[in-house]
Amino acid sequence: MYAPGAVLALCLPCFLSGNVFGYEYGEDYSDSYYNEISNGDRLKTGATQIPCPPQDFSRWDKLFIMLEDSQMKQNMLVQQCEDMVKAEMDTMRKELHKLNNNKACVQASENTCRCVSEQMNHNLNQAMEQLREAADMYQAQNNETLQQLVQFSRNQASRLTKLESNSLLGQVAMKSFSAYPKEQEASTTDGGKLERALMATAADLQRVHVQLALFQRATAHRYLPSGCEMALLFPMRSKHIFAEVSPSMSMSLQSFTICLWAKVTQSLNKTVLFSYGTKKKPQELQLLLARRSVLLTVGGETHLVEAHSVVTDGQWGHFCAAWSSEQGLATLWVNGENVARVPGVAEGHVLSGDGFILLGQERSRSGVYRDLDSSVAFTGKMTGVNMWDHVLEAERIKEYANHDGSCDCRGNVIGWGVSEIIPHGGAQYIN
């Protein structure tokens, strides 16, 4: 757009100076003309000459005219585009105004959205109902399978008892035959039959022992203590595998009791069962395993309670930890027995209420999940996780450590089967 103006500015001085392309005009128009008419002279007639004859346009003139026409066309196109945009905007504005004034259309849209929402809710309820029915069917199948296993165990036990009695009778008969050699020689045929019967009995007894061992291993693999119906499975040691707990009340506590069942696959120097941490204190409260020991820390790792030689890998154990800020008294319980009792632990301390509870892992100092440490992760099974805002009596802790039916007791801060416990990574619930 600026090129024609620049060319015009360069060329105008040349035109004004009368020298274009180096050409000099040699004519001299300084002669004077006289318009005098004498008396008696007749005017000579001839062809009339045009005073300013038209001249042909040069290349530069045509260029300037072209540029001016192009500029005018561009301005006209811009003006036309602006007019079209204004017209379209006015049309859209009128349409929107009509749409806003059309209440029937708006009401129809709301009714359509409401119908779609109701249909989606109906489909979701049907899907949830089908899921519940499938879960109930799966639970019934599991119960039936377990009942069959129990009946099979009873049948095998009765067979084993019969085989043992037959074996004892065979031994008595053998002794009687050895005491009376003459009778034994007389009944050689009966002795051979008895020996074959005893050999068959011994073979059956060995097969029953193998079947019982397999059944015991299968039952132990599926067994959950204390009548619990589900457990958390931590299949491997990984920083991505843990469970996050949402307590039912604030964690700003001056006393507490934590109880849980755990079956650790392998306990290392530091294996986390229960951890509560805040931004300032990532290890505010922890219940840990260290090889065959169990540890409790309150208010940091400096306040420590420890019990040795109480943990066995691959076996279920009931672990409880209690603490009170009034005297700083901290106790540890394993399988219903008090294994540690230490006063003066974090005396006068109050837990902060803005932290996070993790099972099988501890909070990182940065507070980011990707910075968790896999070396402290728990691997195994965990169930019956409960927490109270006070110190439980010794009788209740012993009662909760029973293997039959104590899983129905739940804490008021964390209740197993009631509080929200979300597995992460590969952690999952099992029956």
Image (cartoon, helix red, strand yellow):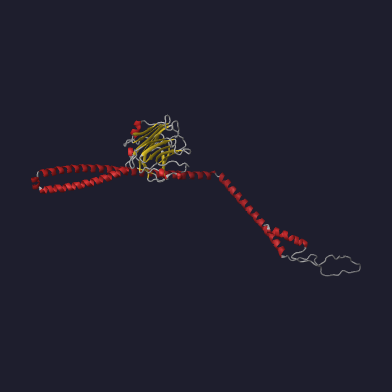
Q: What residue lies at 16% left-to-right and 47% top-to-bottom?
A: 197
Q: What residue lies at 13% left-to-right and 43% top-to-bottom?
A: 175
Q: Quadrant of residue 407?
A: top left
- What count of labels does the image hold? 0
Q: Nearer the viewer, residue 232 or 105?
A: 232
Q: Nearer the viewer, residue 349 or 119?
A: 349
Q: Position of residue 112 (x, y in %)?
A: 48, 45
**Left or right of 174: which side holds 300?**
right
Q: Position of residue 104 (x, y in %)?
A: 53, 44
Q: Is residue 383 above or below residue 44?
A: above
Quadrant housing the N terminus: bottom right
Q: What residue lies at 17% left-to-right and 46% top-to-bottom?
A: 198
Q: Is residue 237 above or below residue 33?
A: above
Q: Quadrant of residue 171?
A: top left
Q: Position of residue 345 (x, y in %)?
A: 42, 32
Q: Quadrant of residue 382?
A: top left
Quadrant housing the C terminus: top left
Q: Position of residue 309 (x, y in %)?
A: 34, 38
Is residue 126 in view from this perspective?
no
- Residue extending farthest right: 39
